[in-house]
Image: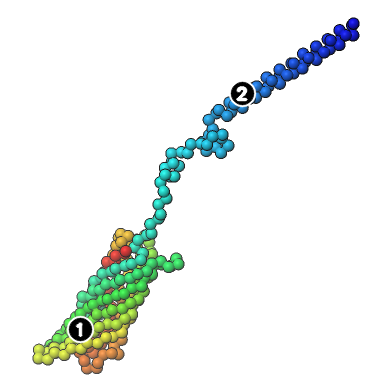
């Protein structure tokens, strides 16, 4: 009988210990579950990739996403030029000179801007003969093509240089009151020009240009009216002011 009582007491003790252990485990599990629920309910940081819910994009991002990317506009004023120029020749037969230039080009492989140009220039002059009984006139119209190069110096300032080759229509006349003799001839020429330029606006430049033209006098008729101007024709120096449009 005493043995049965001891066995019953031992079994009750084990049951109580098992129940206590189960209660402790249940309490621990419930506490961990509450802590986990609290961490899920907290507001996640903006842009946190580990948050349970997607973050709301910022207003700046929404505006950038709403506005489509605008394509960059190509810079104007680098493909075509149109130029008017006026000045005077500086040789012995100094006179008014004027002309114009049209060109197309731009930047090529990182080089300074270079243009293919066509140019036309006109000048005319007259003088009395040494004996004062006659008057001589000379009209020269040059038409040529060539290249122009722009070299940036500082800011809107740059240096331009060009070379043109072509033909000059030469009209010379001699008149003494009773007789008038004229001559028309085409002469080959080469001209070199250089000068500074200031880019006032993206579409407008102002500048100055000095040039020297070498004319081939081999086509002149000896004894004709144009031959009297040979020394002035072979080398002509001109100073011009320029207004250039870029488009």
Furthest residue to the top?
A: 1
Query: Looking at the rendering, which quadrant does residue 113 occupy?
Result: bottom left
In this view, the residue in front, 163 or 68, is: 68
Vertical side of 136 occupied by 240: above or below: above
Residue 68 position in % (x across, y down): 41, 48
Residue at left offset 59%, top offset 26%: 37
* Residue 30 can be seen, yes or no: yes
What is the quadrant of the C terminus in the image?
Answer: bottom left
Asked whether, in this view, residue 127 is left or right of residue 236, the answer is: left
Q: Which residue: 74% across, 16% down?
A: 20
Q: Residues within 10 Å of mark 1 (few under 14, many from 20)?
A: many
Q: Mark 2: give few (<14), some (14-19) or many (20+) Cα within 10 Å.
A: few
Q: CA distance from mark 2 to mark 1?
A: 109 Å
Vertical arrangement, residue 30 with respect to residue 166, above or below:
above
Which quadrant of the view contains residue 233?
A: bottom left
Looking at marks 2 and 1 on the same chain, the residue that comes earlier in the sequence is marked by 2
Q: Secondary structure at mark 1?
A: strand
Per the image, label 2 sits on a secondary structure element best described as helix
Where is residue 195 drawn, in percent x and y? 32, 70
Q: Position of residue 29 (x, y in %)?
A: 67, 23
Above or below: residue 198 compared with residue 33: below
Residue at the (24%, 80%) spot, across then down? 141
Question: In this figure, which residue is indicated by the disc labeled 1?
Answer: 138
Q: Which residue is mark 2?
A: 34
The image shows residue 18 at horizontal and vertical percentages of 77, 17
């Amino acid at each position: 009988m005493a043995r049965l009582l001891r066995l019953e007491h031992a079994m009750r003790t084990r049951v109580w210990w098992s129940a206590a252990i189960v209660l402790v485990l249940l309490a621990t599990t419930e506490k961990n579950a509450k802590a986990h629920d609290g961490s899920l309910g907290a507001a996640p940081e903006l842009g946190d990739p580990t948050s349970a819910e997607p973050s709301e994009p910022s207003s700046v991002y929404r505006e950038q996403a709403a506005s489509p990317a605008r394509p960059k506009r190509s810079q104007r004023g680098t493909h075509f030029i149109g130029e008017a120029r006026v000045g005077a020749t500086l040789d012995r037969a100094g006179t008014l000179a004027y002309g114009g230039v049209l060109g197309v080009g731009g930047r090529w492989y990182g080089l300074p801007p270079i243009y293919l140009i066509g140019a036309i220039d006109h000048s005319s002059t007259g003088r009395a003969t040494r004996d004062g009984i006659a008057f001589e006139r000379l009209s020269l119209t040059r038409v040529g093509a060539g290249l122009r190069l722009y070299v940036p110096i500082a800011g809107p300032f740059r240096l331009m240089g060009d070379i043109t080759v072509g033909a000059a229509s030469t009209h010379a006349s001699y008149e003494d009151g009773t007789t008038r003799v004229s001559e028309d001839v085409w002469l080959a020429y080469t001209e070199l020009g250089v000068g500074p330029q200031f880019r006032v606006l993206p579409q407008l430049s102002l500048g100055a240009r000095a040039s020297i033209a070498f004319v081939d006098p081999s086509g002149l008729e000896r004894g004709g009216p144009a031959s009297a101007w040979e020394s002035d024709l072979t080398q002509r120096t001109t100073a011009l002011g320029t207004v250039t449009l870029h488009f």
